[in-house]
Amino acid sequence: MYRHWVKWVFDLIVAVPALVLLMPVMGAIAICVRFKLGTPVIFRQPRAGRNGQPFTLYKFRTMTEGRDAAGNLLPPIERLTPFGRFLRSTSMDELPQLWNVVRGDMSLVGPRPLLLDYLPLYTPEQARRHQVRPGVTGWAQVKGRNALTWEEKFALDVWYVDHLGLVLDLKILLLTLERIVKRGDVNTSSGALMPRFMGSQPAEPLEGEIGEG
């Protein structure tokens, strides 16, 4: 059986060498973020982990701190620069999450970690996505990413939970590499941003840099 501890060992076998090998790339990205977008270079945000427990997610910053005349942050689509859009489309903004994997907060493969605010909005079936650790990539990401609706994503997340296995994880990792190379399945009409999940209510624009994907 592909138990959680076996999955964690597999994550470490892959994530630790990847983190070491990608350090020069991450350093270069950090320098570019610093000069193109400013500080902080790393975006931090509380997310829901396994069983809904909170943890701090790390990713490279992709938005500016642009504000209007009243001092309010501009809409996300206006703060997402071409450089930030490039980081998102290539998934390079997600590289710091390898540290989340090493820490045990996340897995290489699993449902994407979402906002804590969403926890009370899930249906009981959708909430089952939290039975496993969230992933850097997942079944929903290789099946459509931001081109999918929230409901479609959650259905794919639950399917993954029910079919968890090493072969499936390897397949998802390979498909992820293919999607990154092709930069496919991203809804670019909204700048690669998903609307905020509102449960059974109509969606509304994001208030801040959520950056799911």
Image (spheres, rainbow, N blue to C red):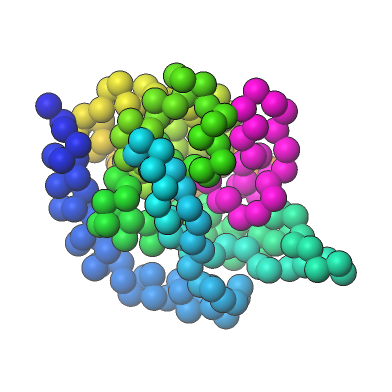
1 or 167: which is nearer to us? Answer: 1
Above or below, comparing residue 176 to residue 82 in the picture: above
Q: Position of residue 122 (x, y in %)?
A: 52, 27
Q: Is residue 212 magenta?
A: yes
Question: Residue drawn 38% across and 62% down?
Answer: 96
Quarter of the rendering occupied by the N terminus:
top left
Q: Is residue 77 magenta?
A: no
Q: Is residue 25 left or right of residue 168?
A: right
Whether residue 152 is visible here, answered yes or no, is: no
Q: Position of residue 213 (x, y in %)?
A: 50, 45
Above or below, comparing residue 90 to residue 204 in the picture: below
Q: Which residues are magenta?
A: 190-213
Question: Residue drawn 45% across and 71% down?
Answer: 29
Q: Position of residue 157 (x, y in %)?
A: 41, 28
Question: Residue drawn 51% across and 35% down?
Answer: 119
Q: Position of residue 159 (x, y in %)?
A: 37, 22
- Toward which corner of the image does residue 27 lie, by quadrant? bottom left
- Toward which corner of the image does residue 199 lie, by quadrant? top right
Above or below, comparing residue 170 to residue 80 in the picture: above
45 or 14: which is nearer to us? Answer: 45
87 or 210: which is nearer to us? Answer: 210
Q: Is residue 102 left or right of residue 70?
A: left
Assign the magenta stretch its main secondary structure.
loop
